[in-house]
Amino acid sequence: MSIFTPLQKKFRQLVFLEHRPESGEVFLKQRRVFTVPSKAGWAFVVLLLILFIASTNYNLNLGFALTFVLAGCAWVNAFLGFRNLAYLHLLAGPVAPVFAGEEAQFNLHFTNRRKHWRYALHVGFASKDHPVQAAGLSIMQPIDIAPDSRTTVQLSCPTTHRGRMQIPRVRIQTWFPLGLLRAWSTWMPDTQALVFPQPEQFAPPLPVSGAANKDGQGIAGDEDFSGVRVYQAGDALKHLAWKHIARVDLDAGGSLISKQFSGGSASDVLLDFSSLATNLDLELRLSRMTSWVLQADGTGLAYAFRLGAIEYPAAIGASHRIDCLSALALYER
């Protein structure tokens, strides 16, 4: 890190108002919109100086007229470029959770409550340490916004690890109408994406406990049907759940499903983090638990979940799955 980084950060906070994340709807007032000449703008300034000096040296009235007309066009360009961006209303939408390694999708809403169009606005991430920017792939999405309307932009951000991921700072900029000036502003919404651990690719079979449940005692047998589970090597062909297999796309990577029986009672699927070998890496254990949650949920098995002080009774459904995956994503030693 450069020794000037803290000073640069402080400067940006004072001048460009880049403070903490902003919640709710944000209004781009005049103070938050900045304009600077583009490369074409600087060339245009040099051209005006040359025209003015030449007109002065040779006393060219038409030269003065051309210089002032071009300067007037630049002034109008500055006004239209500033108005094209200023007074927008910005709002961040909800973010769907993803697994580590996938891309988080951030939905950003831009509302134009004025009576004029907003043309050629470019929206993208501004942070230089953002993975997309670091790879040299500065992706800016152009949008037009009609009067009294809202436009939604979806920005993708790669994820590398589990937990909560803060959206990088967003930059909105425009070169409208002549490209001589760049009007821009930055915005950091107070929104985060929840990133689940990446599922283990070749996880062991689901753990099935022989503990008693409220229906009675016993370990797994072949007397009473108690549910289905992922097929394991050695399962008898007569125990395959053909009705469930018919709904699985095996060519797309789906697994065979076996019927599960119990002798006197159904054994529960208990996903207990403490039962995993402690010599395994923490992230690997969390990935294995994630894979087990997805396996149990995909086969319709009721499963209990235990992670440190967090304990959920056996259940099924999307809500139970999200609770378990969220606990894994936010787990700390």
Image (cartoon, rainbow, N blue to C red):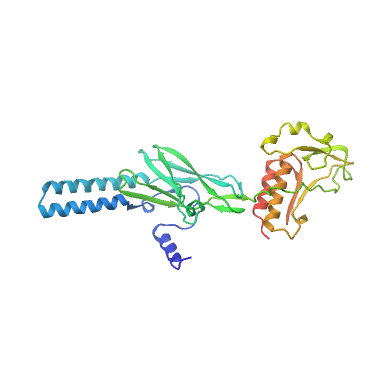
Q: Is residue 172 visible?
A: yes
Q: Is residue 195 left or right of residue 260?
A: left
Q: Residue at position x 48%, y 65% from top?
A: 1
Residue sticking out furthest to the left: 59
Residue 234 image-quadrant placement: top right
Q: Is residue 313 visible?
A: no
Q: Position of residue 282 (x, y in %)?
A: 69, 58
Q: Position of residue 63 (x, y in %)?
A: 14, 48
Front residue of 223/312: it is 223
Residue 18 image-quadrant placement: bottom left
Give above or below for 328 relative to 239: below
Front residue of 130/235: it is 235
Q: In this view, does 177 lie to the left or right of 27?
A: left
Q: In which quarter of the image is the C terminus?
A: bottom right
Q: Where is residue 70 in the image (x, y as percent from the top left)?
A: 21, 46
Q: Residue at position x 45%, y 53% from top?
A: 126
Q: Residue at position x 42%, y 63% from top?
A: 8
Q: In this view, does 165 lie to the left or right of 29?
A: right
Total number of numbered discs in the rendering: 0
Residue 222 image-quadrant placement: top right
Q: Position of residue 241 (x, y in %)?
A: 79, 34
